[in-house]
């Protein structure tokens, strides 16, 4: 699992300590992901399948792709399609993906890179294997998050952020047992590089066997841990969290995650709930059914953009 690695985590800055008066956030629910297909037919785990829209607000969806080893010409992507009303965040742990969009954004993201696309008022984009990956195959592992936008920002101008692995904020726990890669938001006095419309926090954590992560968490945010690989328990009660499962935490000021006898890779996620109606139909997420119908009309009329002519 390449992502971005650090040979000696002890050289990294430490996460802020939990205050003595902080109350641990208890585990409210542990839910399994659900296997499905996405794009042109590649397999994913729907990480939030067992949680409600209210549980995950302001997030909308989490898909984990892989890890899977593809042979030549086996790698599939997501051909051109529209979006409106939210943001997509694609984080690559292994492999590489090419992105193009109708607003001029795009590029190739590889091990440890992130692409952050604000669909806002509307955009067309694709996410496809590079020529190298298509021709040679190889390992592919990544996640995509959908982040909702409040009603006041649904029609924001589209934008694209390419966040290279070396831009992530790298921190560790008090004992150096964790590598915490902060992609966006503020976590324990450290900030990630992602620029967000909706207040959220996203980090990818690698926890050494037997190590424990105790991390302060914004009390106004909800809190989730999604297990990518390996094994861990959550909370002081040591609830088992297998791969492709998500833990939802209740109120409080800090989280506790403990690795089992193997390395644990997981996502730390949370945000400030928007608490507005969510109406989703395919690639559009709005507040009303009328707005969904208008999105389809606008797409069919070409108002969400046109597919650019790609060079080469």
Image (cartoon, helix red, strand yellow):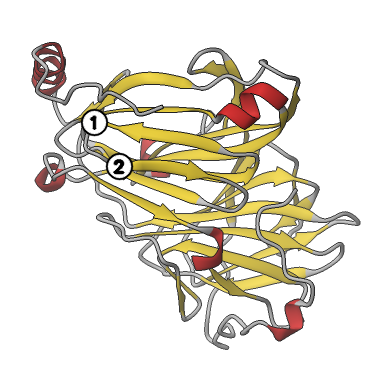
Figure quadrant of residue 308: top left
Q: Residue at x 21, y 37 (%)?
A: 103
Label 1: how many Cα within 10 Å (few below 14, some 14–19, many 20+):
many
Which element is circle 1 on? loop
236 relative to 173, above or below? above
Instruction: State left or right for residue 262 relative to residue 108.
Output: right
How many circles with numbers are drawn on the protein?
2
Label 2: how many Cα within 10 Å (few below 14, some 14–19, many 20+):
some
Figure quadrant of residue 227: top right
Q: Residue furthest front?
A: 312
Mark 2, residue position: 105
Q: Residue at x 42, y 47 (%)?
A: 115
Q: In what quadrant of the picture does the C terminus appear? A: top left
- Measured from the top left, where is residue 75 in percent x and y? 63, 21
On the question of residue 52 being in view, the answer is no
Q: Residue at x 76, y 69 (%)?
A: 212
Mark 1, residue position: 102
Instruction: State left or right for residue 234 relative to residue 253.
Output: right
Q: Residue at x 15, y 17 (%)?
A: 299
User: Closer to the camera, 262 or 101?
Assistant: 101
Tell whether label 1 touches label 2 (CB within 8 Å): no
- Marks 2 and 1, how far apart in space? 7 Å
- Measured from the top left, where is residue 143 in percent x and y? 55, 39
On the question of residue 178 being in view, the answer is yes
User: Closer to the camera, 252 or 9?
Assistant: 9
199 relative to 219, above or below? above
User: Closer to the camera, 285 or 89?
Assistant: 89
Which element is circle 2 on? loop
- Measured from the top left, where is residue 120 in percent x and y? 19, 39
Residue 68 - label: none
Instruction: State left or right for residue 256 relative to residue 222.
Output: right
- Measured from the top left, where is residue 183 in percent x and y? 48, 60
């Amino acid at each position: 699992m390449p992502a971005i690695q650090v040979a000696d985590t002890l050289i990294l800055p430490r996460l802020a300590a939990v205050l003595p008066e902080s109350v641990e956030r208890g585990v409210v629910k542990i839910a399994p992901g659900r296997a499905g297909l996405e794009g042109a037919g590649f397999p994913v785990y729907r990480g939030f399948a067992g949680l409600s829209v209210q549980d995950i607000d302001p997030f909308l969806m989490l898909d984990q792709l892989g890890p899977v080893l593809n042979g030549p010409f086996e790698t599939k992507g997501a051909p051109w399609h529209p979006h409106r009303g939210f943001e997509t965040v694609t984080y690559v742990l292994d492999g590489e993906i090419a992105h193009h969009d109708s607003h001029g954004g795009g590029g190739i993201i590889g091990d440890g890179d992130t692409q952050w696309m604000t669909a806002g008022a509307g955009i067309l984009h694709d996410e496809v294997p590079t020529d190298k990956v298509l021709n040679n195959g190889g390992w592919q592992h990544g996640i995509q998050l959908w982040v909702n936008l409040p009603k006041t920002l649904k029609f924001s101008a589209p934008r694209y952020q390419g966040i290279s692995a070396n831009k992530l904020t790298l921190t560790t726990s008090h004992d150096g047992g964790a590598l915490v890669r902060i992609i966006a938001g503020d976590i324990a006095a450290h900030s990630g590089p992602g620029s967000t419309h909706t207040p959220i926090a996203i980090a990818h954590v690698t926890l050494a066997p037997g190590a424990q992560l105790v991390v302060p968490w914004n009390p106004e945010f909800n809190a989730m841990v999604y297990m990518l690989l390996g094994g861990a328990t959550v909370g002081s009660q040591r609830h088992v969290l297998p791969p492709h499962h998500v833990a939802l935490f209740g109120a409080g000021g800090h989280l506790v995650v403990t690795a089992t006898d193997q390395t644990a890779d997981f996502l730390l996620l949370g945000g400030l709930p928007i608490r507005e109606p969510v109406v989703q139909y395919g690639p559009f997420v709005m507040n009303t059914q009328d707005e969904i119908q208008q999105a389809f009309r606008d797409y069919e009329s070409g108002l969400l953009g046109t597919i650019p002519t790609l060079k080469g």
